[in-house]
Image (cartoon, rainbow, N blue to C red):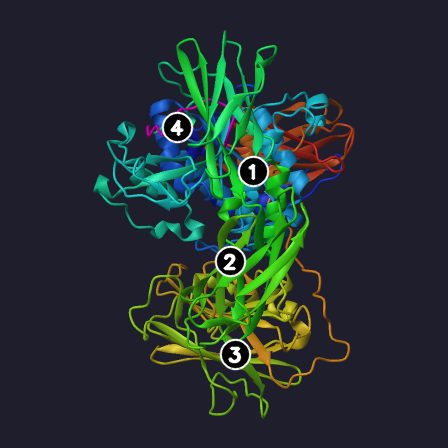
Amino acid sequence: MVTRSWRTVFALFVSFALSLGALLGVASAQVASPVVATPVSGEATPEASPVAEAPAGQIDLDVLFIGAHPDDEAFALATYGQWAEYNDIKVGVITITRGEGGGNAAGTEEGPALGILREAEEREAVGGAGIEHIYNLDQVDFYYTVSAPLTSDVWGYEETLERVVRIIRQTHPDVITTMNPSPTPGNHGNHQMAGRFAVAAFAAAGDPEQFPDQITEEGLEPWTVSKVFQGGAAGQGAPGPDCATNFEPVDPTDQIYGVWSGTPSEANGGATWAAIARDSQRKYVSQGWSVFPDVSEDPNELGCGYFTLIDSRVPFTPGHSEPTAMLDGALVTEDGALPLGTTFYLTTDNYQVLAGESFTVTAHFGGAELSDPVAEVTGPEGWTVEAAGDAVQEGDHWDQAFTVTIPADAASAGRYQLSGTLTDGEASGNTLEVVEVISPVTAAIDPLPNVAVFEDWVQEVGQPQLDKLITPSFSMGVGQTYELTVNLTNNSGEEASGSVDVELPVGFEASSTSEAFDALAAGSTGAVTFQITNTDPSLPTSNQGEYQVGITTTAAGATTTEQVNLNLVPVTTVLEAATPVALDGTISDGEYPGEAIDLSRVWEGTDPDSPADGSGSHQIAWGPDGIYFGVTVTDDVLGTVLPEADAKRHWRTDSVEIAIDPLGTSENTSSTFKVGIFPTTQEGNPAAYRDADNHQGPVAETAPGFELASSVSEPYTGYIIEAFVPYSALPADIDPDNATINIFIYDSDTQDLTGQTRLGWSTYGGVQGDPYRWGKAIFEGYTPPADARTTTDEPVIPLEAAQSVNSPQSILQSTQDGVSLAGKPKVSAENEITVAKAPVLEDGKLKISLASGAADGTVSIFAWDGSQVIASTSAWALGESNQLYLLDVGDVTSGTLLIGYETDETGEVQALAVPFGE
């Protein structure tokens, strides 16, 4: 039966997490000063909970998921659960943040308190899939952003990667699963970075030159992971038992594995793993997931969890469809297969290769049990592969080089697979490697800034094939002209001349559809430009207006065509208000010059039943000191009305969001102004809160001079919001020709803080984080001040995150499996905290004396009676001193003290579990 011990334990911490004062400690202490902690109540558990009775030791995981937030692993729980039940696969989870920047549908907790609550939810949820090992890295979840570069800056790339590598070296997983590392539209930047840390750690953990202090100072050893996968897949598949075999990938070179969620669980009375996973997903209550509907009872309607192979160091058999097929060669093996522990993979001297030329592919293989291994490599039809000499052996490892030649007339541009086969006696295994055949001259438009960073990163980590996930794109406004630059690279060894042609969709024209280039030197770059104009302003825009531009390059006897996405965004002209706008929650005729703009386009979520169920419009005007917004919303059900103190995280209920990029150049929303506006609160007033922008927080603090008014109809049929945004509150001054703006309507017809429908003006998936796809706003007649701010203010990003040293959940985890808190280095011997005197329990008072090591730091202490935390405190730990702590534990007669400690200067950590009482 799947064990659920952690699920039992950590459900008990939820009530504890609801009290921020108890969470962070109710008092502090100096040397020899007793500390009295306030007891914290909680419900008892019907079954015994484990305590850290055995010494902490090295945990040995099989699979490790690396995600950004609690719940990122949620949609793979059906896979992990059946692995645990039927294959005894031990799965662990690294969660880089505790999600304290997200919403809360369960209460008013935010910041660190919400983080501890979400940690408890995650532990309870994954317990349903038999997962008992969860490691939080203590990085901050600052807000939704699609920018991986911003996330990397906030978290610190090297610091976070070092923590991930340390946990891998402490837990020894054979397989890593993770998230999409690429900046595909709408992909959360935190999710992207989780994927990138997983891929980078796959390379770094086994390399003794990476983070060598972990080896020389901390006593860890390099650990080589066998496989790394990205959750999800690009393509289509049908549900049912055959979903693992009927999936059709967009890219045929992808190795995609499916694990059917309809598998029944014997340990759970025959319930499908899809149903069990859904029950687990409902544990993420703070995220509004408790309302998730039941899954289908018809197994034929249940689909697969899909995974895409990023890299492998072990032999496997492509095409297998068993639930454990993706673990083949790393954790499971079959009759006739090479033994576990065998390595086998291919590398090439170049990822991009030219038709008509040769390149080298090397087969790397080894293993203590191999006796006479032989490697072979085959290519696509028409390619020739010849061994380049004998295999070179060093110990139980071999390298065999092959020369691969692509006939000039046998290949076209695209991605191709090289197949490797390793035999040793009667046993054999396979592997694959991908190369991209490119044209002598290639053409590409300028990548978006975050895409350029990603393209550099895939080269750095040796995974260039990952850039296939990105479709080049650019945006332009309705009726406007855009200068499209096409960059050229001569990949050949000879000078090249040729042409670039653009094929435009209907409704667009170019001053010239063909541009020639001459004498482009070998290995050099060049460019041609096209002036593209939208000639049909009636074309659909936004998520209904994504168009394809074909770019065809002809040179050196080769012709190739690349497809580029053209995002057509709406345009408005913002006029000056003839008279000052009266902010009274009503919109009078002529108050806002210019036409009202429709906001009824569905952006995300469920389509409204009718305009009365969800629709709206907005009007904008500029004045001498700022911008006026009038938004009219038609709605039939008023969502949860929040108190003013909780008027934040506006997507949880009915609200309007105004987004402004004053310069029109922002790569992400940290250089924009975004405000969520609630039409009413329990106190009867509207409220506003800046979120996910240059300066988060209540507008009274973050946007002085911001004004707001609203009116809510009686009986309820919707509301009107009027807002004034002063220029001084923007992160830069308005560029009247290039500014971008967006308006969104969030519609909730529930009373449980969950939204159903998102509407807006310029709408794409994830567009709230993509300023380049917001609507263009031309401020007619507006002249910026002489001293206009033409660079944006530095963003103010909330950096307070819950810390593992303050989390009894994480402390208990560390004491049980020996993995260091937050992936930080463990304290050195001279800095360890020790128990100077055994805990004494008298008359409901628990006394504990701790001896500090040589370093100053902070210590957190939690008294746990076996079912709940009953008291806690935190204090300074001063170097080389004894400290006495006094906790009020009531009528408890025995339990465990969970102690977390972190040094100030070095950030070393320690976790202790100390029994007390009978």
According to the image, label 2 marks what residue? 551
Disc with the residue nearer the chain's start (3 vs 1)? 1
Q: Nearer the viewer, mark 3 or mark 1?
A: 1
CA gap, disc 1 and disc 4: 24 Å
Q: Which mark is residue 318?
A: 4
* Secondary structure type for disc 1: strand
Closest to the observer: 342 or 303? 342
Whether residue 3 appears in this view of the structure is: no
Disc with the residue nearer the chain's start (3 vs 2)? 2
* Secondary structure type for disc 4: loop
Specify the farthest residue to the left: 298
* Secondary structure type for disc 2: strand
Tell me if residue 683 comes above or below residue 2 in the rendering: below
Residue 880 is left or right of residue 2, and the answer is right
According to the image, label 3 marks what residue? 572
Disc with the residue nearer the chain's start (3 vs 4)? 4
Q: Which mark is residue 353?
A: 1
Disc 2: CA contacts within 10 A as few (<14), some (14-19) or many (>=20): many
CA gap, disc 3 and disc 1: 47 Å
